[in-house]
Image (spheres, grey):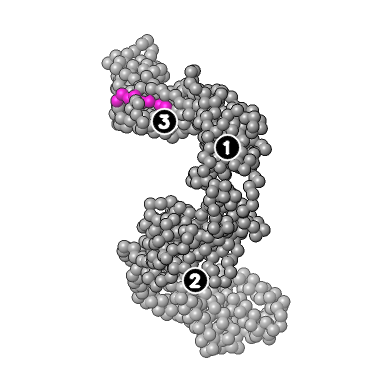
Amino acid sequence: MKEKIFKKKSMAVSEIIILVLSTIAFSYMISQSLPLVSADEGGAPATTTSSNPTLTTVALPVGAGIASSIGMKYILANAPAPFVGSPVPGLAGSSGGTGFFAKILERFTSPGKALSGLAIAGIFVAVIAVYTFIATLIKTGDASRALESALRVGIGAGTGALAGYLLYSVVGGPAGWIVGGLAVLGAIFSSWLRRETDREISFTCKPWQATSGGANCERCNNQLFPCTEYQCRSLGTGCELINKDTDEPRCIWKDPRDVNPPEITPWQEALTTDYKYEPLPRGQYGVEILYQNDECLPAFQPFTFGVELDKDGYCKIEYQRTDSFANMRYDFGGSNLYVKQHKQQMTFPGVAHLEEAGLNLTNGGEFEFYVRCEAATNGIANREEFLFKFCIDDGPDTTPPEIRGFNFLDKTPLAYFAENEPREAEVQVYINEPARCKWDWQDRNYADMQNNLTCANSLINFNSQLSYTCYGKLTGLENNAENKFYFRCNDTFGNVNAQSKILTLIGTQPLYITSTKPNDTTIKDSTNVIKVTLEAETSAGYKQGEASCYYTSTAGSSGYILFTNTESYTHSTDIWLGPGNYQYSIRCIDLAGNSDTKQISFRVETDTTAPIIVRAFRDSQSLKIITNEDASCVYDTVNCEYDFEQGIKMTSTGILHTTKWDPNNNFYIKCEDEFGNRPMPNSCSMIIRPFEL
């Protein structure tokens, strides 16, 4: 940005002139060099000369003199002695006159002196103000600014003159001249200090240049929305976006001075409740994971732990020692993103289960996992491994299997079963350890349940959630009713569930589309592209017709588009179409999977022309006109140059429009259709003259 300041030379000249004129005004006020002559109807004024040769009193008319004398006497009689002093020579009737207060009153209660000085000062102050106004107006062209300057300078000059006048009254003599002059100069100088200057500022727009370094890179990671490449680069020349095209983009500082690997610490918030970290003895880099009161971890119980880094990094985990980060095989937590926090979930069978499976443990149920991380900022990884150490309970298994869940949520709705359709559903049961499981329609003991599930009994056959899966088929399902099923399991050590796990599935009704719009109709508007609202209503199904609806213009197409307003029993969406014939397919689906489909067709027409009067005639005492489409009509009796809203309304019913017949006036008629099409402001739909009908 460049800034230029132009000093107002003319303003300086103006202030010099103001100073000279103010000083002249002041000199007239105190010197009384221009006496004021006053007359009265009774005769010439009388002049009284005091013993003081420098003081001349000019008497005003009798009335003013009496009032002045009375006022002076009252004030001096009641003023404190220090302010009054001894009588003033030459002032008739005064009781004092040498004090500070008395001198000022003497000046202002001597009308000739007061008015003479103030009149001359007023003239010169007015001249100063007018000059300032004209000069400022010529310079700026702004009348309000010129007036403001004139008032400011005038008030300053007047205040200075008044102050000088009062000081001279008190001090008197040459000292009074000096003090009074200083007062005038002070007022004008104060006004000069408040003067304004004009500045011309010009701006130059240039391409954005990011600041050097990358101290602000982290700011991009603390936004409401994910950081973008542009945002990251704009925060510094050293900023770079990592984890692109993922849900966790990160902006980091690629600092060339950073030559350190990430610092690894255990992440406390990632640890499962009732678990804790315990630092390893000196000489070992890592922690031990303990359960509750310094115990080994329970078998088949998933737990999570994690690491936290001082900089964004990518971490790996191994169950045996390796030479380097590159030789490690497993991503920590299954993710290869560069972040500061990493979480890992694990579960382990008990020692007894491993031994039963014929696996002999040489570590006595103790496990070690090694972690290294690589920094995103410099690609440097840890040389030393961070160790997680824990043991699994080696006692006998005395707990029954835990049924963690199903492939259905409880109270999931099922699609309506049509006639002759098998009323069954495939089910998956997830448990924490290898076991045998059963189900029944009633709550019974495990031994009495009638239906078996097929379960994976191998220790290594677990899913991504570290659970073992049993498969089966639920039968006997009913429409429009709650279907309850009971499950129990028995592990390989004979531990059986004492309570059943319940799964409820909801039977439903068919879903119906009861109404669709528009269908078999023509849609008109006055634009080239017309808004068409597709509507549908649904009933029955799950939750009394609550569903989601879709539409497509191609029958049988899989490219259905979701309605804008849906997930209820009423549905609507807007589309914009040009003139033509259209067919759409509407499909609605509820949460249970019930669906229904309807076809609609309609025509779109564009109407951009005003209504046309196709017939006009007189019927008895009425004028009647007929238009080619439904419209409303108005008329005027002067000409066509009137606003439609200002016209005289005719009685309109569809295409027929009537008004009272008047043989003495012409009818200048304008008609407007339902889309707002009407004649131009200076045109009519028809002009009817009485002699033509």
The amino acid type of the residue labelled 2 equals Ile
Q: Nearer the viewer, residue 51 or 33?
A: 33
- Give left or right: position of 328 versus 53: left
Mark before the other along the chain sequence, 1 or 2: 2
**Residue numbers of the magenta segment:** 580-587
Q: Position of residue 57 (x, y in %)?
A: 57, 80
Task: Return the residue at label 2.
Answer: 155
**SS assignment at label 1:** strand
Element marked by disc 3: strand
Q: Residues within 10 Å of mark 1 (few under 14, many from 20)?
A: many
Closer to the camera in the image, 636 or 129: 636
Disc 3 residue type (three-letter): Tyr
Q: Name the residue: 60% across, 37% down.
A: 489
The residue to which callout 3 is attached is 550
Q: Is residue 245 above or below residue 470?
A: below
Residue at 33 percent across and 30 percent down: it is 577
Along the polypeptide, which appears first: circle 3 or circle 2? 2
- The amino acid type, in three-letter code, at marker 1 is Arg
Which residue is disc 1 drawn over?
436
**Does the segment drawn in magenta span residue 188?**
no
Looking at the image, is 686 positioned above or below residue 138? above
